[in-house]
Amino acid sequence: MNKFSLILLSLFFYSANSQTFSSFTTAGNQSQYVPVSFKSITSDGGNRTFFITRNDIHEGRDWLAHGIVAITGIGYGWGSGGNGLRVDNFTYGYETTNYSKIVNFLGRVMTANATNDIIVFLRGGTKYYYTNAVVVSNTGAYQDAAGLSLGSVSINDPFYNLPKGTYYGSGDINGKTSNFAAIDNGNVGIGVSNPVNKLDVNGIVHAREVKVDLQNWPDYVFENQYRLNTLEEVEKHIRDKGHLPNIPSAEEVIRKGINLGEMNVKLLEKIEELTLYSIEQNKQLKVQSDKIEKLEKQLEQLVSDKNNDHEKKITFPILFTDRIFGIFPNHSVFQI
């Protein structure tokens, strides 16, 4: 094969595999997210990942938006059961030109109810480039035959403005919830789209074992300088505030939740304090028990001494009479 043929073959494969981008400008204005409906089935019948992009952050306005988002998904299609979404969002921008709030150009992604289309909320009044899809609707509103009705929303709506990251969902990936999210700061969310910790889970966690690293285990309770509240002080604190000292109230727990490691430390602190109270009470009980035992012996001795004195007082006249008169041969019958 000559060089010319190789060049033609290379051009053919490049043309066959290259992606052609089209452009459109969203309805509405830049203070809104607006719904745009896409059909990701391409002209050759495939259902592929489609892309929406902006390569110049200053196009249309300084510091407006740039980046790329890849969306893989299929709509409900009247309950076909194949619906699902994956979104890889690498978009960025600002609310205004003065580096104010970060507003990514991707707000939310949903699946249509009556078709296999994907509805993407994009920042309004902005030009975008896309490939591997067809824009079905770009009017600033969306409604399908299954009753789904959507309109424009503020860019400050908490359910919009997806952070940079990768998301999975069944039919709706928004700024609050998704099935799974891994955002660009390394945080992971399960049932949460914008995790603020390394792992945020909106649901039940079942694990064989959980290990928590701690720095301040409460053995300090057993140190001599530790001030143990008196039981009277504990009683007053409970009466005044309704909970144990150094333990959060029910209201605080409902509002803030609890730190598992910190709460285990606090609970062990209370257990160790209870142990000290029990040791002190045991000492007091032992002292009281010794006193009671001593008093019982003294009482027994007093009773014994009293009985002996009583016997002497009763027996003496009988013995005396028996000796003198010899009247009673068996004087014991008169003893009391």
Image (spheres, helix red, strand yellow):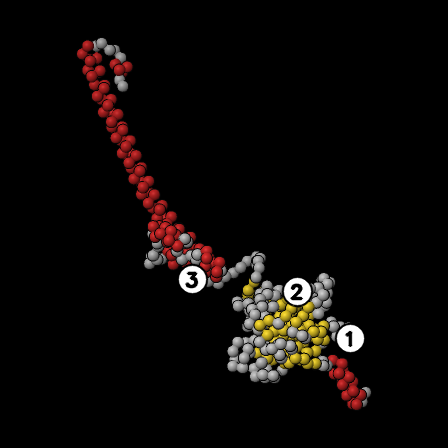
Q: Please name the residue shown 70% across and 67% down the image.
A: 144
Q: On screen, 222 above or below 45?
A: above
Give whichever of discs 1 and 2 has the lower sequence position: 1
The secondary structure type at the circle numbered 3 is loop
Q: Is residue 31 above or below residue 180?
A: below
Q: Quadrant of residue 121?
A: bottom right
Q: Give amino acid for label 3.
A: Asn
Q: Position of residue 83 (x, y in %)?
A: 70, 65
* Quadrant in the picture for residue 285: top left
Residues at marks 2 and 3, CA–CA distance in whole angstroms: 43 Å
Q: Which residue is mark 1?
A: 44
The residue that label 3 is drawn on is: 216
Of badges 2 and 3, nearer the viewer stands 2
- Mark 2 = which residue? 170
x then y, percent, for residue 128 = 65, 79
Question: Please, which residue is most extreme toward the right here?
Answer: 1
Q: Earlier in the sequence, mark 1 or mark 3?
A: 1
Q: Determine whether the residue tagged by mark 1 lies in a helix, strand or loop.
A: loop
Rendered residue at 64%/66% (across/down): 172
**Residue kind at label 2, given as amino acid type:** Ser
Residue 324 in the image: state x and y as whole percent: 18, 12
> Is the residue 27 above or below the residue 145 in the image?
below
Q: Residue at x 73, y 63 (%)?
A: 78
Q: Is residue 120 visible?
A: no
What's under tag 1, amino acid-wise? Answer: Asp
Q: Is residue 229 visible?
A: yes
Label 2 sits on a secondary structure element that is: loop
Image coords of residue 289 (percent x, y)? 33, 40
Q: Badge 2: few (under 14), some or many (20 or more) residues near its Cα, within 10 Å?
A: some
The quadrant the N terminus occupies is: bottom right
306 relative position to 145: left or right: left
Q: What residue sits 55% from the left and 64% below the top?
A: 200
